[in-house]
Amino acid sequence: MPPKTRKTKKEEVEEEEEMAVEEVLQETKPMKLPESDASFDRKIFVAKTGTLANSRLIKLRHPKEGCALFRISDTCFDEIIGINDGHRSFFYGESVIENGTVHLVAPFNPIFVCLPYLQKTSEKFLEIDEILKDEDFEGIKELTTNQRILKALENVTDVKGYLLDVKVYRLNEKKMLEWMDRKFRSLTEALRTDVHKSLLDSPEALDRHVFSFFIDFLSPSMIPTIKTHLNIQEATELENQDQSMKRKATDEGDEYEKEKPIAKKPKESIQTKKLQAASKGTKSISAFFGKKT
């Protein structure tokens, strides 16, 4: 049996550190997590105060995107826009909302949704439920009984009233183009304060910039007609060259970033190495909030 040797001061300190780490791990050992309760599922909505009551969510055919979720009520019509970076959750009281998507309730003019249907039936007067019908999106029926939306449609249609309060509608292209012009000018004024000075110095470039946003509300078939009516000019050769130079400068900046020397990884302390060794086999905190399979 080998004789006992006196421990050095360093060995005693290391032994004490190991015991402290083990004690911490025992105290923080996770217990079995509770099962998720479906009744606590929640979503984060950002909307104007007092507008969510008495409203309904419906799926409709978006004039550009094909499908979108909308909120409708007697006083509001809004698009629901989801914003999610893929790595977000929320603490709500003593529970966790796993899906960190933030839903913005953004005002959307219902005329843009109705225009593709009005275009298809522009040859004759029809009742509104004969115009706004879609086998794939039954929610369109909600628009046919909403008096606020029906009143708005008079901005782009001819309306005739018959006996028993029956009204028929037909798209009026002249009224529609005039309405588009007003909306485009309104959007231009709203964006004017946020654009670069170079755009303000060039009305044609500013119109192109605003139109790039405006087409997000138009069906592809309508874009050429509206573009011609608003007199949106194509970019000049000089402007395209400027844009090309900007892209080149950006690419060179990216190359510089790639060539920058890689920072050396700092040397790990003895305590850090011991904690890593002691934590082998345990799950990270992000695993507790991930989806259960």
Image (spheres, rainbow, N blue to C red):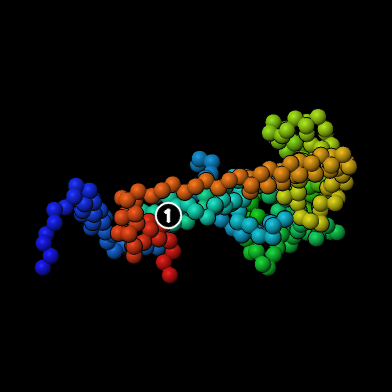
Q: Quadrant of the C terminus?
A: bottom left
Q: Considering depth in this image, is 224 or 206 the residue closer to the camera?
A: 206
> Would you say residue 44 is visible in this rendering?
yes
Q: Secondary structure at mark 1?
A: strand
Q: Residue at x 73, y 38 (%)?
A: 187
Relative image position of residue 266 (x, y in whole percent):
44, 46
Residue hosting label 1 = 97
- Badge 1: residue crowd in 10 Å (few <14, some 14–19, many ≥20): some
Left-right relation of 255 to 170:
left
> Would you say residue 175 is visible in this rendering?
no
Q: How many marks?
A: 1
- 284 versus 229 height, above or below: below
What residue type is disc 1 on? Ile
Relative image position of residue 5 (x, y in whole percent):
13, 56
Q: Residue at x 86, y 50 (%)?
A: 225
Q: Quadrant of the N terminus?
A: bottom left
- 291 versus 261 height, above or below: below
> Quarter-wise, where is residue 155 in the image?
top right
